[in-house]
Image (cartoon, rainbow, N blue to C red):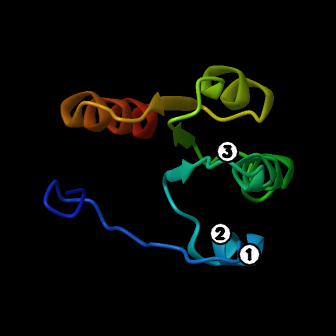
Amino acid sequence: MLKEEGYNVLISQKPFRLEEVKEHTPALILLHHGLSNDGSIICQSIKNCPETKDIPIIMSSTRPDLPILAEINFANAYIQKPFNIDEFLDLIKLSLNS
């Protein structure tokens, strides 16, 4: 879907490596926060690193506490799953332009 909208997409597989983020310097990170706290750890790692702290992060999840998780982990935005595709694309555009 994002490629169809003209975005270059890189999918990162587990395990998370901060070095991979530094190497590719993405314009935006879409981060799924699952039932474990991996999403929190990843978000904090990126935001606590001087080289990556300014990369916008959009956190997504089905968790009802997502707004709180996004705030305490310094995500720039969040979107609750399931989400409307148009709203998701608007959030991406907004995050890239801020």
Q: Residue at x 62, y 21 (%)?
A: 67
- Position of residue 50 in the picture relative to residue 59 (left or right): right
- As drawn, 22 above or below 41: below
Circle 1 sits on which residue? 17
Query: Badge 2, how many Cα within 10 Å: few under 14, some, many 20+?
Result: some
Q: Residue at x 76, y 46 (%)?
A: 40
**Residue ranking furthest to the left:** 4
Point out the tag, 1 or 3, that comes first from the N-terminus.
Answer: 1
- Position of residue 69 in the picture relative to residue 9 (left or right): right
Circle 2 sits on which residue? 21
Q: Position of residue 39 (x, y in %)?
A: 69, 51
Circle 3 sits on which residue? 54
- Position of residue 49 in the picture relative to residue 63 (left or right): right
Determine whether label 3 and label 2 are within 8 Å by CB. Answer: no
Question: Can you say which quadrant of the picture contains the N terminus?
Answer: bottom left
Q: Secondary structure at mark 1?
A: loop
Query: Badge 1, how many Cα within 10 Å: few under 14, some, many 20+?
Result: few
Determine whether label 2 and label 1 are within 8 Å by CB. Answer: yes
Q: Secondary structure at mark 3?
A: loop
Cα–Cα gap, marks 1 and 3: 17 Å
- As drawn, 50 above or below 59: below
Which quarter of the figure has residue 63?
top right
**Which numbered mark, 3 or 2, is in the foreground of this view?**
2
Amino acid at dot 3: Asp
- As drawn, 79 above or below 96: above
**Which numbered mark, 2 or 1, is in the foreground of this view?**
1
Q: Residue at x 62, y 28 (%)?
A: 66
Q: Nearer the viewer, residue 7 or 80?
A: 80
